[in-house]
Structure formats: C-alpha cells, structure tokens
Image (cartoon, rainbow, N blue to C red):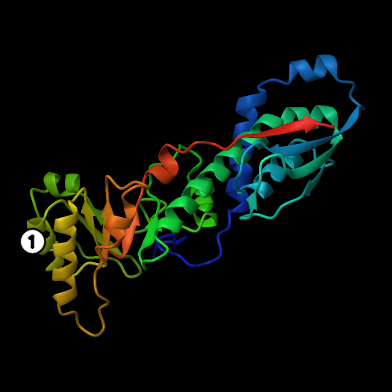
C-alpha cells in the first residue's frame, strides 16, 4: 500500500522533519560554500545583534517554522521569536519575527531563511486568492507535480496553508493514466489490476475519451484542456450514470488553461476538483527583508 497519502487529504498540514532538515542543509551548502568570507572578514566572532524580519507587502504568512529551522541549523544558540502565527495575514511594514544571537550566524543564515519564507508565503498567498474565488462552490482546488526540484513537499505544504488541497505528491501514491501512457499502449480495453489502497485516475481530452473512461468507473477522471461546454456535458453524463452502492461516483477534475480570472466558470460546471499548476510552477515570492536593529 502506498504511504504518505496527499491526494485530497484533510489532515493537518505538516512537514516531515527529516526531509525539512535535508532541504535546509542542501540549501545552506549551496549558499555558503566553503564559508561566508564577507562576514568572517568584517564581523567579530563574539559580536551579537538583534534583527527583525519585516513584511514589505501584504501577504499570507507561510514557512515561519522553516525560517526558524534555518537559523537554528546554522547556530542552535540563535533566538527566534515569531510575532505572527502560520497561516495568518500580515500587513506591510509589520514585524514577522525578532532574531537575536551571534551576528555571524544570523547574517550567514539570512538569505536561505528569507528565500524559503518568501517563496512559501507567495504560494500560500496565491492559493488563498484562488480559494476565495471558489467560495460559492463545493469544488476543491488542488496543486500539481509542477514544482521546483527538491522543494515539492514544502510547496505542497504552502498550498495547504493557503486553503487548497494536494494532488498526488509522487508517482508512487496513486495511478494516473495520462495521454502518453495511452499512446504508448495504443489504447486500452481494460484497466490494470490496481493494488489495494491505491486510487486510479484517467486523463481524457474529449467526450469520446471521457465516455470510454467512465465505462470503467475509475476514482477520478481528469478533463484535460476541455472546453466549458464539454465539461458541462461530462458532468451531466457522470451525474446520470448508475454506480453500485459500494462504489463511490467517479470524481471529475478539470485541468489546463484555468486561471484566477476564469476559475469560477469551471467551478460552476459542477466538477469536483480543479487542479492548477500555477500555484507552484510560476509563483511570485513575497517581498520581505531582514533588518539589523
């Protein structure tokens, strides 16, 4: 059975501590190299300072514990005092956290901590904007696997903090038969034997493919880049299909070409899920800074 079920999970969002430590250590090695020579040459070893992380725009905070972990990884003696809780909105010019300790440690950890904090907050903020558009509907918003290499777990965590849901996190979580699978096997007349505990999803691109896929009653059918009128028809067909009492109705997922300005139109069709790659693949980091005080 697969592990770490992310798909539409309702459990409290959290980050695996071991994977977080690995991500941070790799990021620090990438940034520091053989040492922070500027800090080493200009800052006395015993010099202590206090600094503040400041918001320079309005956004939804995500990754405060990640930022703290970065500073603590560089120097466990650094004190980190959050001034706002995870998942809360913060206004420009407000203090996010106060940090105190060795100047060399704080300045060396600064960039990695701010990079992760600003990226995750950007994802959470964008996700919240999409979620607000879906407020009148029952449709669930999910991310995709279009993430930055090495940062997928953090990015999917940020989507959850923003109020969205996760799609599968890895290829081992569920079966998703996409167009290239179907092309490679030149079509299909039956589904593979699915191991217990795994969901199966089939991607389709038109109503003919949809009707063929629905015949097998998979857990989910992805309506990829289909027009609104086609999606409306697919929903009608699904709703009129009889499912056995022990089999939940197939969920429908709209994907492709969906943005903030048109997501309501797709949700109004009655689909169960809308997946948006933009949540993680082209996100704008929020503007924050660290100022010594």
> Which residue occupies the extreme right position in the image?
46
Q: Residue at x 13, y 60 (%)?
A: 210
Front in this rendered view, residue 83 or 146: 83
Could you say which quadrant of the image residue 131 lies in? bottom left
Q: Is residue 16 visible?
A: yes
Q: Is residue 175 visible?
A: no
The location of residue 129, given as percent across then percent down, is: 47, 51
Could you say which quadrant of the image residue 22 lies in? top right
- The answer to whether residue 175 is left or right of residue 20 is left
Front in this rendered view, residue 238 or 33: 238
- The answer to whether residue 60 is left or right of residue 185 is right
The location of residue 93, given as percent across then percent down, is: 71, 39
Front in this rendered view, residue 281 or 22: 281
Is residue 111 positioned above or below 57 on the image? above
- The answer to whether residue 3 is left or right of residue 261 is right
The location of residue 204, given as percent across then percent down, is: 17, 54
Q: Residue at x 37, y 45 (%)?
A: 277
Dot 1 lies on which element? loop
Q: Quadrant of the N terminus?
A: bottom left
The location of residue 109, given as percent across then percent down, is: 72, 32
Q: Residues within 10 Å of mark 1 (few under 14, many from 20)?
A: few
Is residue 18 positioned above or below 29 on the image? below
Front in this rendered view, residue 138 or 18: 138
Q: Residue at x 74, y 28 (%)?
A: 108
- The answer to whether residue 57 is left or right of residue 255 is right
Q: Residue at x 35, y 64 (%)?
A: 139
Is residue 243 positioned above or below 79 on the image? below
Q: Which residue is mark 1?
A: 189
How many numbered marks have been drawn onto this rendered protein structure? 1
């Amino acid at each position: 059975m697969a592990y770490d079920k992310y798909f539409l999970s309702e459990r409290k969002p959290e980050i695996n501590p071991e994977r977080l430590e690995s991500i941070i250590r790799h990021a620090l090695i990438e940034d520091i190299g053989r040492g922070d020579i500027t800090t080493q040459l200009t800052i006395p070893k015993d010099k202590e300072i206090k600094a503040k992380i400041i918001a320079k725009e309005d956004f939804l905070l995500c990754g405060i514990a990640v930022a703290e972990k970065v500073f603590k990884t560089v120097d466990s003696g650094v004190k980190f005092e959050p001034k706002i809780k995870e998942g809360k909105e913060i206004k420009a010019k407000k203090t996010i956290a106060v940090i105190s300790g060795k100047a060399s440690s704080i300045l060396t950890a600064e960039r990695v901590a701010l990079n992760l904090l600003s990226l995750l907050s950007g994802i959470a903020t964008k996700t919240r904007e999409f979620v607000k558009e879906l407020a009148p509907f029952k449709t669930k918003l999910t991310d995709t696997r279009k993430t930055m290499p090495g940062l997928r777990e953090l990015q999917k965590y940020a989507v959850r903090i923003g109020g969205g849901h996760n799609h599968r996190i890895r290829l081992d979580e569920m079966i998703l038969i996409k167009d290239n699978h179907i092309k490679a096997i030149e079509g299909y007349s039956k589904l593979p034997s699915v191991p217990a505990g795994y969901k199966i999803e089939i991607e389709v691109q038109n109503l003919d493919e949809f009707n063929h896929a629905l015949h097998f009653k998979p857990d989910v059918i992805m309506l990829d880049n289909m027009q609104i009128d086609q999606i409306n028809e697919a929903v009608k067909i699904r709703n009129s299909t009889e499912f056995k009492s022990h089999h939940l109705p197939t969920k429908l997922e709209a994907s492709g070409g969906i943005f903030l300005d048109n997501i309501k139109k797709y949700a109004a069709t009655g689909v169960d899920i809308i997946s948006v790659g933009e949540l993680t693949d082209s996100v704008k980091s929020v503007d924050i800074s660290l100022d010594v005080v």
